Image: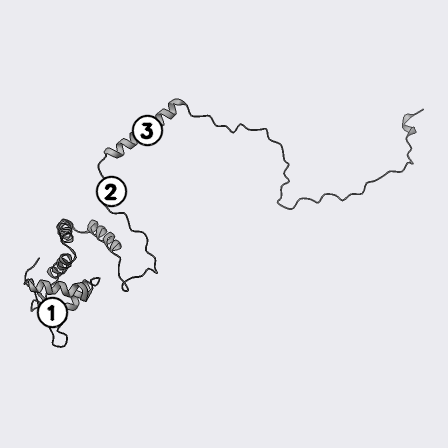
Amino acid sequence: MDPVRDIDDEAATTVIDRPALPPPESGTRVSVAYSEPPRDTIADLPSLWSRARAFAGAVWRDLRERFRKARLSDRLPPPPPPRSATATRVSAGAVGHDERGEMVLLEIMRAAPAYQHAAVYVANYAIALRSRGSEAHAEGVVHYALSRMLPDADGYVSFGRLRDILCDISVSGALVPALLRLEKVGVVRIKRTEEAPSLPQRVQLRIPL
């Protein structure tokens, strides 16, 4: 008997009806996840020699920083923090004392050699004035400002010009009292008006700084 003929050609064939998988979107690559072998995540510990060399290097850098010559930045005050645009100020255009100091230091670096040498003497004089109190410092500032202002044909400087240059100094609290003390010792001569006798109109420097 032929075994092939034992197969019933007339037997019903069962077909499983299930939806086919949709094709991948254009540009999408089908990825197949594969299990990866476990990795050894423990790094090799540094050798004793490398740790000793790193320690010796740190000690040498510390000693070098201790015995090196002081840098210029070591002798300067720290830079001022950024000032808020809404910070309270005395008047429009006023500059904080720390910001003015930074501007002065930068301008000294950019100034001509003659002014750089002069800045040393001015700084020492200002430090000496500070040590004598606020009134002596105010008198010194006014005296210095008058010494650097060109007078008119009569040898006088208008009080308005002096006030504009020293705009951060209170007129009634410091500027006028300093002028009165300088007038008393003969350093300046003050001219006044009948309309406002309490305020100077013009100032003449008699003894330059």
- Where residue 118 sits: x, y (%)? 13, 51
| Label located before the other in sequence (3 or 1) | 3
Q: Nearer the viewer, residue 20 or 129?
A: 129
Does residue 57 appear left or right of residue 47 in this picture?
left
Q: In x, y percent, where is residue 92?
A: 28, 64
Say which element carries label 1: strand
Q: Residue at x 26, y 54 (%)?
A: 99
Instruction: Kindly report the distance in space between the C-alpha atoms of the residues bearing marks 3 and 1.
Output: 68 Å
Q: Which residue is mark 3?
A: 57
Point 9% across, 71% down: residue = 191
**Which sits in the foreground, 187 or 133?**
133
Q: Earlier in the sequence, mark 1 or mark 2?
A: 2
- CB contact under 8 Å: marks 3 and 2: no
52 versus 118 height, above or below: above
For badge 1, the amino acid type reads Arg
Q: Is residue 209 left or right of residue 172?
A: left
63 left or right of 204 in image: right
Res 6 → quadrant: top right
Q: Residues within 10 Å of mark 2 (few under 14, many from 20)?
A: few
Task: Report which residue position mark 1 lands on.
Answer: 202
Please name the amino acid that badge 2 sits on: Asp
- Residue on which the image places disc 2: 74
| Labels 3 and 2: the sequence-earlier one | 3
